[in-house]
């Protein structure tokens, strides 16, 4: 099982240090530093940098940020062991971890995976109605009414993948004229 660098202990301290170091660089390039996670999976340590932008993120954006932060990390050397550096976008089903994430997605559909079953289920989906940082909880609007969930009970909260809102599959032209009209 991976040790999460965003949770507790040494990994969290490393992630926080790296975030403080890299935020000005990433922001200076015109991106938002969405998240920093330092974790071990098997024998390999990973430093995962997640960036975002109002215009979305492309592979070129990830490469641009990677090239900019790599020398900064080498110079500051905030991590004593070797690791693999990854830069990515948060994606459509982005994980919500920080207060600013929850506040930005109030009213959005979310999926919540729980550590232990609640009302017989280990996952629940609904509209993110409220986030309370002081009480460390979220309130979801579900088909059964409002549900209050302490963040300590939530393993992962992600923006729901609602493909109907992204594209109407009937509107996509999938004909390819480069092969003479053969599908």
Image (spheres, rainbow, N blue to C red):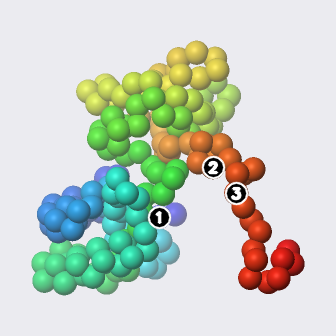
Figure check: 67 above or below 35: below
Q: Which mark is residue 2?
A: 1
Find residue 125 and report its image quarter. top right
Label 1: element kind: loop
Is residue 39 in view from this perspective? no
The foreground one among 66 and 120 is 66
Instruction: Name the residue at the right extreme.
Output: 182
Residue on which disc 3 sits: 172
Figure check: 142 above or below 18: above
Is residue 180 in view from this perspective? yes
Image location (x, y in percent) of residue 162 = 61, 43
Whether pointer 3 and pointer 2 mark residues with C-beta atoms closer than 8 Å, the reply is yes
In the rendered view of the protein, which quadrant contains the C terminus? bottom right
Q: What residue is drawn where x is 33% and y is 34%?
A: 103
Distance from disc 1 to disc 2, alpha carbons, whole Å, reads 35 Å
Image location (x, y in percent) of residue 182 = 87, 78
Distance from disc 3 to disc 2, alpha carbons, whole Å, reads 8 Å
Residue on which disc 2 sits: 167
């Amino acid at each position: 099982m991976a040790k999460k660098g965003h949770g507790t202990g040494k990994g969290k301290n490393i992630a926080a240090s790296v975030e403080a170091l890299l935020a000005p660089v990433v922001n200076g390039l015109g991106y938002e530093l969405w998240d920093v996670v330092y974790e071990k999976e098997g024998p390999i340590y990973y430093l995962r940098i997640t960036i975002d932008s109002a215009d979305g993120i492309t592979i070129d954006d990830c490469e641009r940020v990677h090239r900019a932060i790599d020398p900064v990390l080498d110079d500051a050397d905030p991590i004593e062991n070797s690791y693999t550096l990854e830069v990515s976008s948060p994606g459509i089903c982005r994980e919500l971890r920080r207060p600013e994430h929850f506040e930005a997605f109030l009213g959005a559909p979310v999926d919540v995976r729980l550590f232990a079953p609640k009302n017989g289920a280990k996952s629940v989906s609904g509209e993110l109605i409220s986030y309370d940082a002081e009480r460390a909880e979220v309130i979801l609007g579900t088909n059964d009414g409002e549900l209050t969930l302490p963040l300590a009970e939530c393993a992962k909260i992600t923006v729901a993948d609602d493909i109907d809102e992204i594209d109407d599959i009937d509107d996509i032209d999938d004909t390819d004229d480069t092969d003479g009209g053969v599908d």
